Amino acid sequence: MRRLAAPSIILATIALIFAGCGGGDEDTTTASSTGSTRETPSQGSKDTAGQKKQPTSADNTTSDKSASGGTPQEGSKAPAPGVPVTKGGDNSIQTYGLEASSGDRAEITALVQSYLDAIAAGNWAKACSYLTSSQQQQYDQFAQALKVPKGSGCPAVLGKLNSRIPKKTRVSDAKIDVLSLRIGDDNPTGQENAFLIFKGADGKVYATVATREDDQWKLLNGSRTPLNPTAPG
């Protein structure tokens, strides 16, 4: 079994964003993710401790160029080069909001990469630090159902959810090639959200959701949604 399906109580949080951007029928699995844009430091983003962090590591290097060789155009409504779409199908994630600036893309890429690296290393506490506070609380509430020690919270639950995924698979999953970052605030809460779209080591294209919390980007739940084209139903 390559990955565990994320429990419905956890994935319920993503419904708010899908409701705001038109929904989707893709299957979401756990990862082992305004029209206006913001100016961000070009030297890297800040992690949860407030320290500067470069967007990527030497082993998991990403770039602004997509797999097709094109460069995402800031402010574009059209899907970025290399991002798969389905003719006549649901492309609400691929066209959500507008294409973000390279600074925003670097910042959220760093966030996602840090989360994936923590998952690959089995550092569940660090991985939890990249999630929204509401998601961490949901993991805490789900602890009893997963039969983890009471009071162990998010790290124990996250570890339990990933326990059946081999480490080599988690390491492979941490290698991503970023294709696009879509930012918008047209969801029901009016909160700024972003979809980072990337190609995984398996050659498939996925999206993961980040949201602004206390003026800092956090991952909604760390799950990834496959975006490869499928025929409309």
Image: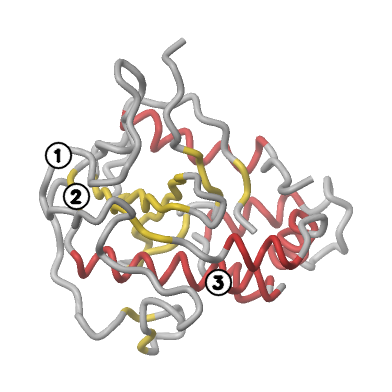
Distance from the alpha carbon under mark 2 to that under mark 3: 26 Å
Residue type indicated by callout 3: Ser
- Residue 30 image position (x, y, % from top left): 63, 49
Structural crowding at the residue carrying mark 3, measured as other residues with C-alpha within 10 Å and reported as few (<14), some (14–19) or many (≥20): some
Amino acid at circle 1? Lys
Q: Nearer the viewer, residue 197 or 9?
A: 197
User: Which residue is denoted by mark 1 in the rendering?
Assistant: 77
Percent position (x, y) of residue 196?
37, 53
Residue 171 location, x and y as percent?
64, 68
Quadrant of the rendered image containing residue 94: top left
Camera-side mark, 1 or 3: 1
Q: Quadrant of residue 11?
A: top right
Question: Which residue lies at the image location 34% right of the left edge and 59% below the top edge?
Answer: 212
Q: Which residue is mark 3?
A: 129
- Disc 2 is placed on an element classified as strand
- Disc with the residue nearer the chain's start (1 vs 2): 1
Q: Which of 142/202 is in front?
A: 202
Q: Are marks 1 and 3 in contact (CB under 8 Å)?
A: no
Gap between marks 1 and 3, in whole Å? 32 Å
Return the residue at label 2: 99
Horizontal relation, residue 53 to residue 105: left or right: right
47 displayed left or right of 28: left
- What residue do we see at 60% from left, 59% from top? 136
State yes or no: discs 1 and 2 in contact (Cβ < 8 Å): yes
Whether pointer 2 and pointer 3 mark residues with C-beta atoms closer than 8 Å, the reply is no
Mark 1 to mark 2 CA distance (whole Å): 7 Å
- Amino acid found under the numbered disc labelled 2: Glu
Q: Position of residue 159 (x, y in %)?
A: 76, 63
